[in-house]
Amino acid sequence: SGEGIGVIIDHNNLRYQRIRENAGANMYNGAYYYSREIVKNIIPKVKTDRNWITVNIQGEGCSHAIVFVHNNLQPERYEWLYQYGFTDLILVCGLERTCEMVKHLGTPIYLPLSIDLEYMEKFKGIEKTKDAAFAGRKMKTSLGNLPPGIDRLTGMKRAELLRRMAEYNQIYAVGRTAIEAKALGCEVLPYDERFPDPGIWKVIDNKDAAKELQRLIDEIDG
């Protein structure tokens, strides 16, 4: 693991696990799977004495930490960091515009969303036999305009979702799901009016994101 690594508050936190158990189909959400990849592929490759917060659980925090902001739609859900008095925070945002919305909480940095390309390899050989589907959380289907009757891949474990997505030529998705769809050779289509251009989703590996994160942290901490 990284040198001088501090406290890590992640998806293994007991309070977070209890919240997940009561979340129904939403327990398979992007923040959970991203946290797993951050802990596995990013934190061990970054040298810092800072603490890490990879999930959002009100009250479960610390100062001098690197905080991954998962909620771009409602970044105010991180206001508790300020209310609890946590200081000297680096806020890692997957969208540039989120940086502006959380800058009062600490130092925001933009780190493009990334995926575990090595893990994706096992799903790449699946034959594409279907046209188009939506992939993501069920609640997101109300955010935009999906064609009527389209297949909806929601509420399933990541491995099952990736297996199913690989069968389609086109996927309506945003964020890391869109990036994974591209890695599977799917054409990503827009449905959420906030993200009209699927070109913003670039296929970036966790390990490359770790190098960029190290550079950004070094700029701040020296």
Image (cartoon, grey):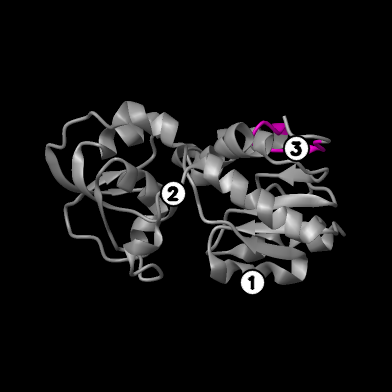
Residue under pointer 2: 176
| Position in image of residue 17 (x %, y %) | 64, 33
Q: Secondary structure at mark 3?
A: strand
User: How far, Cα to Cα, is label 2 from label 1?
Assistant: 21 Å
Task: Indicate whether 52 appears above or below 83.
Answer: above
N-term-proximal mark, 2 vs 1: 1
Q: What residue is rendered at 25% in x and 44% in y?
A: 185
Task: Indicate whether 211 appears above or below 77.
Answer: above
Highlighted magenta segment, given as a residue range: 5-14
Q: What residue is rendered at 81% in x and 46% in y?
A: 50
Judge whether residue 207 is colored magenta: no
N-term-proximal mark, 3 vs 1: 3
Residue under pointer 3: 8
Task: Indicate whether 115 appears above or below 198.
Answer: above
Q: In the image shown, does 164 or 76 lie closer to the viewer?
A: 164
> Which quadrant of the rendered structure holds the N terminus?
top right
User: How far, Cα to Cα, is label 3 from label 1?
Assistant: 24 Å
Task: Indicate whether 141 appears above or below 24.
Answer: below
